[in-house]
Amino acid sequence: MESAAFVRSAFEQLGLQLFERGWLSSNNVLFRASRSTPATIVDTGYGSHEAQTQALVQEALGDVALERIVNTHLHSDHVGGNAGLQTRWGCETLVPEPSFDLARRWDETRLSYEHTGQTCPRFKVDSPLEAGGVLRLGDYRWKVATAPGHDPDAVLLYQPDSGVALTGDALWERRLAIVFPALEDDRAFDDALSALDLVERLAPRVVIPGHGRAFTDVAGAVQRSRQRLHQFIRQPERHLDYAERALLMFHMLEHRRRTVSELLTWLASTPVFVRIVARRGLGAGEAEINARRVVDSLLAGGQLQRHGEWVTLPGSPG
């Protein structure tokens, strides 16, 4: 209760509101306008949740316009609402500097949307968000720091007066985000560890993660994430397993129900899974066998259910 009261007090001080969304859409953090800064949202969720995102912002701001979007990184679950918010309010949009030109040119391959088989409505970008810089949100100055690992271009935001950090997907409370570059090169795990080292040095009192509730046991979260990363470093194939399962579950959260045939085709043809098959040392002809193994593992674990030819999330109709 004491930590919850502290979190509420910190949020009130900073003029921010957290919309905790789930796993298909990232959390959204809304900052009220001040005399010198516009109303701003940090991360905007997945495209299929666009209407809900706009409704949350409208209810919170009333007659005040949302004028600015800031993104911690450009994965589809963090930027999918950008286009709709821009259409409705004409928002200026800031994205991490290394991703700025990719977004401006809309390079869907290097932005990961084509690679992961996910969708993202095209949006415009106005300014790069530079690591090492300062961003004013509400009445406070936030430090911008690079936080690679999950995404090589990602940043986190840290407000030193209040001790609040927005870590994106660099740190969650009890789970670990896929380290996407490590699907290509195991050395990328070092970047994820360096992001945890950064959070440890900053020692925030409150973390607002990209998914899940805000939390205050930051040291515990860092320790758990570091232990999981070291497990993956020792056994990289476990990270491949984790990535396949997580990406398939994300796909099911988006589509809710798919036939077995649709899932196997999607898994066998989507570039990220094709790359994982190659990392496993399997031939192209074994992609469907690998796809069936992934689906069967989630069915056996109860994360998915089968109704005849249909695969659904638990509790969903067949």
Image (cartoon, helix red, strand yellow):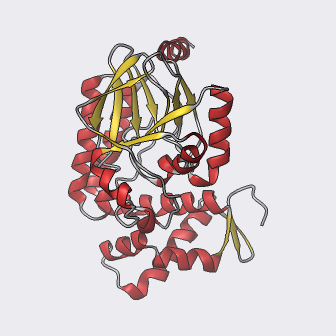
Q: Position of residue 150 (x, y in %)?
A: 35, 49
Residue 73 lies left or right of residue 144; in this view the side is right
Q: Position of residue 292 (x, y in %)?
A: 53, 76
Among the 4 quarters of the image, the one containing residue 263 = bottom right
From where the camera sits, is residue 176 visible?
yes
Residue 10 or 59: which is nearer the viewer?
59
Instruction: For the N terminus, give its image quadrant.
Output: top right
Up-down: is 164 above or below 256?
above
Among the 4 quarters of the image, the one containing residue 306 = bottom right
Which residue does the image show at 64% across and 76% down from the upper left? 260
Residue 159 or 288: which is nearer the viewer?
159
From where the camera sits, is residue 303 visible?
no
Up-down: is 107 above or below 157?
below
Q: Position of residue 176 (x, y in %)?
A: 41, 45
Q: Residue furthest right?
A: 317
Which residue does the image show at 40% across and 69% down from the upper left? 272
Up-down: is 260 above or below 6?
below
Q: Residue furthest bottom?
A: 285
Q: Residue furthest front?
A: 90
Residue 66 lies left or right of residue 201; in this view the side is right
Q: Position of residue 175 (x, y in %)?
A: 45, 43
Which residue does the image show at 26% across and 55% down from the upper left? 234
Residue 127 or 59: which is nearer the viewer?
127
Up-down: is 294 above or below 12?
below
